[in-house]
Amino acid sequence: MAKIKRTTVIVASAVVALTACAPAGYNGANSSAAEPVAVAAAEPTASVEPDSSASPGAPGASGAPAADQAPPPANVQLTDQLVGKKIARMGQVVVDQEGFILYRFDKDSDDPPSSNCVDKCAQVWPPALTDGNPQLQGVSDDKVGTVTRQDGTRQITIGGWPVYRYIGDKKAGQWKGQGVGGTWFVVDPNGKKNLTCLPTGTPKAVAPPAAGDSGGSSSGGDYTY
């Protein structure tokens, strides 16, 4: 039974600039967040076997949330599984139950764990929320914990770093969020930044989704958070 370490930390708001990533050699500094078809086609999917060098975990600890923790909203998808694996070109990554790559944010903190991605930032980078029961494979249970967000929900941490999806990734195995703004990076199974495949320049992130749109605008923008 993998026991999720609980760290209660209230997050603070942050103002950060966002941009997106592509495989090496793609310079998106003067383009929109939508990548050329050739670039998208070059991206691998997370279809390989989990890396055997990482310690496999078991189901996370169960139990009701503590008094200071709010249950995740009914319309929010929980991250039920963390899988550490090695994929082509990028190397060591962590994906969720749908195969989407997870990221960490340099404006956050691992000691103590805290998340500074809230409001519009969290719309572009949805936090990996949990009810305390993620299944672990290829990720050591001693690397996995939680942090209490400003709204009382629990976000998964790896190596102390809160982890997120990126809405610019439209399919499993993409890493369009790599190197965004020089602050967002693919996370490896130990919670470290995976710097294997970095974009040139600072391509822009997708804009926060409009009302009724869960995917975000592909035009990007000059907004800051």
Image (cartoon, grey):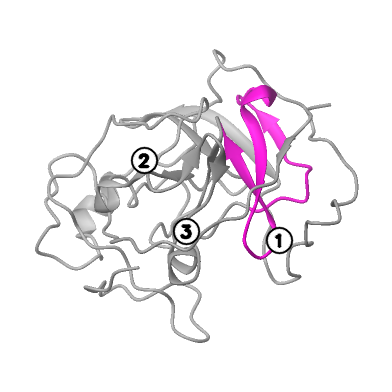
Pointer 2 or 1: first along the chain: 2
Q: Residue furthest top?
A: 53
Q: Is residue 215 magenta?
A: no
Q: Residues within 10 Å of mark 3 (few under 14, many from 20)?
A: many
Quadrant of the drawing holding the N terminus: top right
What amino acid is labelled 2 in the image? Pro
Tell me the tag on residue 86: none
Residue highlighted by disc 3: 117
Quadrant of the drawing holding the C terminus: bottom left
Q: Estimate the x, y position of residue 124 in percent, counting from the top left.
A: 43, 65
Select label 2 or label 3 by which is in front: 3
Q: At 66% across and 28% down in the image, what residue appears? A: 137
Question: In this picture, is 21 found above or below 158?
Answer: below
Tell me the tag on residue 44: 2
| Left or right: 173 in relation to 182 | right
Specify the segment rendered in magenta: 129-158
| Left or right: 46 in relation to 156 | left
Which type of secondary structure does the marked residue at label 2 adopt? loop
Of 6 and 209, nearer the camera is: 6
Question: In this picture, is 76 found above or below 132?
Answer: below
Residue highlighted by disc 1: 152
Question: In this picture, is 84 found above or below 109?
Answer: above
